[in-house]
């Protein structure tokens, strides 16, 4: 059994071929893809794959908290297979989306000292180093 298949089983998800391939894609492509990106990249590998299948699979993954839905792109829903707490940066010129490490949330926001923070969404926008020069 491969590690992606085991990961899905451990999270209570039946490991169909489509789910395994989509999860593997998210784990190996740190590009914060859209449904259309995933569809275009996986269609040659699975000709019977539909956008509806991808959408429903991503919805399940988000519900099970193994994928994050990120709202940094006003036009497209994007998805992230990296679920540890981190921020996202989007370049206003080239549109790239990058992961940004977050310090311990309680140091960043001391007022949450007495809370148990399970999720944090921080989106930064500006210009990446390639677009500044």
Image: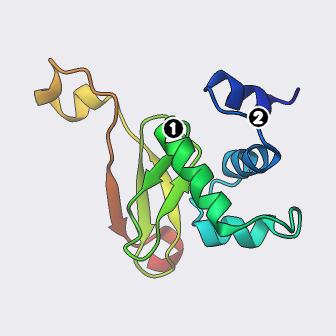
Of the numbered discs 1 and 2, the one sitting upstream in the chain is 2
Residue 133 visible in the snapshot:
no
Residue receiving disc 2: 4
Badge 1, how many Cα within 10 Å: few under 14, some, many 20+? few
Residue receiving disc 1: 83
Image quadrant of residue 67? top right
Q: In percent of the image, x 34 and y 56: which residue is there? A: 123
Name the spot of residue 88 as percent of width and height, x first: 42, 54
Name the spot of residue 29 as percent of width and height, x first: 69, 55
Q: In percent of the image, x 57 and y 66: which residue is there? A: 34
Q: How many marks?
A: 2
Q: In percent of the image, x 50 and y 51: which residue is there? A: 99
Towards the viewer: 53 or 37: 53
Towards the viewer: 26 or 60: 60
Q: CA distance from mark 1 to mark 2?
A: 15 Å
Residue 87 visible in the snapshot:
yes
Give the farthest residue toward the top.
114
């Amino acid at each position: 059994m491969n590690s992606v298949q085991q990961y899905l089983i451990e999270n209570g998800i039946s490991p169909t071929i489509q789910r395994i391939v989509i999860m593997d894609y998210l784990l190996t492509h740190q590009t914060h893809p859209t449904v259309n990106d995933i569809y275009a990249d996986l269609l040659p590998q699975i000709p019977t794959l539909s956008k509806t299948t991808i959408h429903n699979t991503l919805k399940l993954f988000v519900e099970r908290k193994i994928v994050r839905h990120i709202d940094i792109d006003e036009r497209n829903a994007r998805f992230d297979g990296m679920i540890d707490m981190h921020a996202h940066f989007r370049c206003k010129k080239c549109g790239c989306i990058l992961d940004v490490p977050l310090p311990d949330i309680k140091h960043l926001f001391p007022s949450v000292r007495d809370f148990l923070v399970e999720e944090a969404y921080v989106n930064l926008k500006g210009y990446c180093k390639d677009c500044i020069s």
